[in-house]
Image (tube, rainbow, N blue to C red):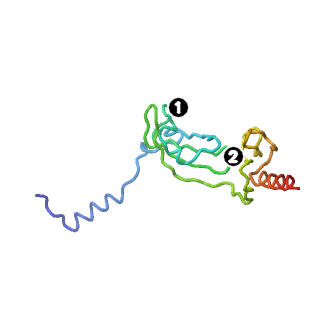
Amino acid sequence: MAQAKTKEEASVVDIKKSDRKISPLRVQLAEHARHDWVVNAEDGTTIEELLNPAYWSHIAKDLTPFDHIEVRAEDCTWLAELIVVQKDRTWAMVHLLAKHELVKNNVPLPSNDAFAVTFNPQYKWRVIRKSDGKMLQSGFNTRDEGAMWLTNYLKSLEI
């Protein structure tokens, strides 16, 4: 049976624990200990998809636990920070550290199901007709600019 420690013995143990110092052998530069990845997610990718281990199947072999992944939405509306928790050759489990909303859409889209404002890296924000995918206008720097153009376009059709 273990003997009860005296106050002096207990305080010596507590002091030893609080005096613990990190060994230089346990410290290294981040670039030697992990990889930092940047992923440009396709338009429409959701955070839920990023958290699905199968999403990473094509690059899982290159990942290691504790790797950092910065995922950028193609349309520049959000950025997610992830850390690799577990992995195998065909999957990787990641943990969401943070999601940052980068753009607030202040202009509401017109309630018209025939048109959409979408992002494309080549054309930037653009207005398309849903029925045939025809691009009506492109080159907008923000979704709000595209929404304003679409609102004005629909008003011109009513005249």
**Residue depicted at x 84% and y 52%:** 153
Q: Quadrant of residue 89?
A: top left
Residue 30, labelled with which disc? none
Position in image of residue 130 (x %, y %)? 72, 43
Spatial separation of the CA atoms under disc 1 and disc 2: 23 Å
| Label 2 sits on residue | 75
Which residue occupies the foreground of this view, 131 or 44? 131
Identity of the residue drawn at 72% across and 44% down: 119
Vertical relation: 21 (above or below) 53: below
Tell me the number on the disc at residue 58. 1
Q: In this rendered view, identify the residue nearer to me: 75 or 137.
A: 137
Provide residue 23's location: percent of width, then percent of height.
Answer: 40, 47
Query: Helix or strand or loop: what does disc 1 sit on?
Result: loop
| 129, above or below 101, in the image | above
Residue at the (22%, 68%) spot, across then down: 7
Quadrant holding the C terminus? bottom right
